[in-house]
Amino acid sequence: MADRESVSVAIVGSGGAGALTAGNLLLEAASLAGWQGLLSRTVGPQIRGGEAAALVRLSSHPVECLPDRFDVLVGIDWLNAQRFGAEIDVGPHSLVISDPRGGDLPPRVAAAGARVIELPMKEMAKEIEDGRPNMIALGVVGRLVGLGVDVLSALLEKRLSDKGAAAIAASRAGINIGFAAAADYGSGLRLAAPKPTGARRWLVSGNEAAALGAIRGGVRFAAAYPITPATEILEWLASNLAKVGGVLLQAEDELAAINMIIGASFGGTAALTATSGPGLSLMIEALGLATAAEIPLVLIDVMRGGPSTGIPTKSEQADLNIAVYGCHGDAPHLVLAPQSIGDCLFTTQWATYLAEALQLPAIVLSDQFIGQARAAIERPADVAFIGQRAKATDIAGAYKRYAIAANGVSPMAIPGTGGGQYTADGLSHTERGLPTSSEHDHNTQLDKRRNKLAQFNFGDHWATIEGKGDLAVITWGSLTGAAREAINRAGGIGVEASLFAIRLLSPVQPERFAAALKGKSRVLIIEQNHSAQFHHYLRAHYDLPREVRVLNRAGPLPIGASEIHRAIVEWR
Amino acid sequence: MIAAGSPKIAKVADLFAVAYQIEADAVERYELLAGQMETHNNPELTAVFRDLARAEAIHRDEICRLAGDIDVVARAQRVAKWSRGESPEAASLDDAHYLMTPWHALRLALAGEERALAFFKSVMETAKDPAVKKLAEEFVEEEAEHVNLVHRFLRKYPKPVDSWSSDMDSPVSQE
Amino acid sequence: MAVVDIPIARKPSDYRSDAKPIWCPGCGDYHVLMSFTRAFAELAVPPEDIVVVSGIGCSSRIPAYTNCYGFHGVHGRSLALAAGLKITRPELTVVVASGDGDGYSIGGNHFIHACRRNIDMTYVVMDNHIYGMTKGQPSPTTEPEFDTALSPGGTGLRPFHPLVIALASGANFIARCFSGEPNQTAAILVEAIRHPGFSFVEILSPCVTFRPDEKEWKNLVHDAPVAATNDPAKAARRIMTDDGFNIGVLYRGDRMPYRPTVAQGSLDLAELERDFEL
């Protein structure tokens, strides 16, 4: 039987079973062996001991989305697993490994027609001193996909070193037992050997990648208020900013956080904060201030289910409206969206560069899915985008902070620069920065702030455009991967479509958009929110061809490649 | 000497009411712990706590029966109040853990029975009314039997390994 | 003939809903929930006449675990929401539940003004010296040397003193309790709810998951060495001796609770136009 291009595995367990740890180790071992992969998870409402599922997809190619159905589903136990519903779907070709003492299979799984093998992992673990069933599960999966037991073993030394030699030995024994148990489960799930490209590879989450991107872009101050699912960005920055001479301050709330970064930026330091929807709502007033006073900042919004407190542990793309339109008054600013875990690095770095170049806020719309998922990816290429704001130095004569310039960008005097003293203000101001209510000054400055965006050449990074065909699949953010996979699959059966994933959501790029849609008579818009915000946004600002279809849905279930594929293929 | 904050027991009817409440509180507490274990996917402990609740319910009902005409339920609402600490057989909630083992649960139960035993002993020692003294003595004997029973059960369960509370997965942030 | 409402005797279970708490087994908040239901039963206020208002955090999950009306609002703003409710519905018993993050960090500003305003309500803060729900960041009451991912090596910051802030801002009843003494806590809650004006009760409630060191708290708490007082100056001096583990009522003030005088609005709406008539 031919080896497979990709294999997907779900590991389910509760009450301390360690399903998530098994998933993490699987991804890491596979990536050490040369494969690429993606790990996400889904959990119950408990803080500890809840039902949990690690969702892993491995391949010799880049993996950017999860499958609709898993090839392998391992149930260490099934307690409350029916909660996961379609997130852990299997089909008639799937293999289910089930602990017979772990409760009943969830109804969907039982009805799927998959092959079910019973393996008493909990009992087998008891044979080992301090044995854990998740290690047995890991050994089973390792054998199935063709991972060497030595790779798994070596990893244990590294990852469990803080638990002591006994724990490592016990885990190793568990993996060996699982490996042996799977000997006659068949070889139909073996992964094709990874294609070594010599490229360096990383194991990283979107949140971590975004944090690194910010530092690379020049951020040296961050203000932090914890919120799910953004806290990891801030926790990573807490220790790593210090290593490069930067500082993170924990704020008392989001209002303080955004104002802190405005203060740092006013003082000359590129600054960032990260939050989610509820925090962004709080930060909106100050966002307007930074826009009006022309102060650069980066604000990462790791979107989650909304509205209000919503579903904090799930992904949606429903903050587009507030990101673009949230400010009172006319306050145009940057809104960008990374398209994958690796792209979190690029987009955040680019956003930092743009914010500094254009002296205004840049909102980066990440989401819970790419923020918290981990991927084994090729090391992203270095890019030269480093924030460099135009500074006023050697000031002669009266300094005009907001002087009208051809490209709309006026050099910024950093406190400490002789002759450059000015008062930054949210009030409508003159070129010198003094408050005014004059029609001339108000409109001149509004024009200036609009022009600086309109005249900037954002280049090709504004969107990812791939493929041909008269159907353009337009999407953004974390759905890019699923859309790409759907298009590739459709191409495989002769149905052509092109991918159009927008990275720079605001300011709009009408000429580039029109050029990209040349020759396309149909567009299929894909987005993860209830009211089709992206569709309405595109309609408001761009010309669309007459035939438009929209595939939109709120969370918590991500829109998958199969759904998009169906929408493409059914539209002929 | 009776611990500060314990109910004052002047008459036999009061002692019945307090004894009833002690068992009733124990039932409720074990049911609560069973519910916690169920929510946190520990079916073994769910069953253990349900069993303990059932056992206490038997004791509770027995006291009701022994009390005869006395309305222990109504009287307990007035009389069986602890202003400090809790009623002695209520298992300590703070010692619960989602990964706890039957051994831990039985240790909780043992501590509860020992506290109850100590309570009735102090009632017996300080009672002025001979009828109260006599009844308290009966409760002391009863609780002493419970203590022994729990010890016997404990001997069947191995002490948990040092890593009993180790969970390889990190906590999950829900908001 | 006037009908007198004789309150029916209540059991704590009357105030408990079926919802299963997501709190980790061993969490102090289970005891706090018990204290709430015991206090409500003692007060014998019907469950439908009580509203429990909360923000965001583990402690703030408590309303749905009671059988009263509840509002699980946004982070840090429960006091403001409760003020609007109580002013317009003064006959309701309003209890506000929060944690040290929700209440003293993002809610800090509202805390000061709620004490100052002195509307009749009871504010209960379950303090576990950590942000539990978001996995262990320091809160304003976290010890300066406590190491976390967000503040490696500790914050180095002096912790917030909520009782001091409450006293300075005008709270009318101030107490500290320990979750491990649910009956004592229930009795203090009863007093706090009965006491007119803004009552503040801080309940030390250990976090079994992120602060296992707080198991020690049961050995550190002790009855406050001095009696409660109604003299703010005395209370301020008492606070100087507070080691953070004094349990009991600190202060019972005599401020009149804030109740805007609402005239019986019987004015004909047409009268309102008078101002504009030529």
Image: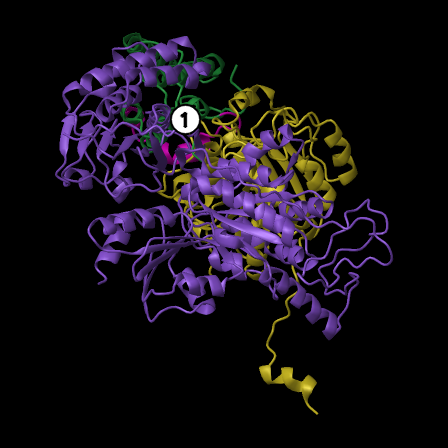
**Residue beneath label 1, please?**
B18
Above or below: residue C151 compared with residue C61: above
Disc 1: which chain?
A: B
**Chain seen in green:** B
Q: Residue furthest bottom?
A: C278
Q: By what rule are the colours in the image chosen?
A: by chain
Q: Position of residue A37 (x, y in %)?
A: 34, 33
**Does residue B75 belong to the magenta stretch?**
yes
Q: Nearer the viewer, residue A295 or A43?
A: A295
Using the rendered image of the protein, determine whether residue C272 is visible from the camera's viewpoint: yes
Q: Nearer the viewer, residue A379 or A224?
A: A379
Instruction: Confirm whether residue B133 shows in the render.
Output: no
| Residue span colored magenta | B61-85
Quarter location, residue A86: top left
Relative side of A177 to C112, left or right: left
Quarter of the image with the N terminus of chain A in it? top left
Specify the quadrant that holds the C terminus of chain A. bottom left
Which amino acid type corresponds to the residue marked 1 in the rendered image?
A: Val
**In screen coordinates, is A63 left or right of A184?**
right
Instruction: Say whether residue A213 is left or right of residue A572.
Output: right
Crowdedness near tag 1: few (<14), some (14–19) or many (≥20) residues, C-alpha within 10 Å: many
Residue A552 is covered by the magenta coloring: no
Please name whichever residue, A243 or B144, is drawn nearer the observer in this view of the structure: A243
Secondary structure of residue under mark 1: helix
> What colour has chain A?
purple
Q: Colour of chain C?
A: yellow
User: What residue is at 35 percent from the left and 19 percent from the top?
Assistant: B105
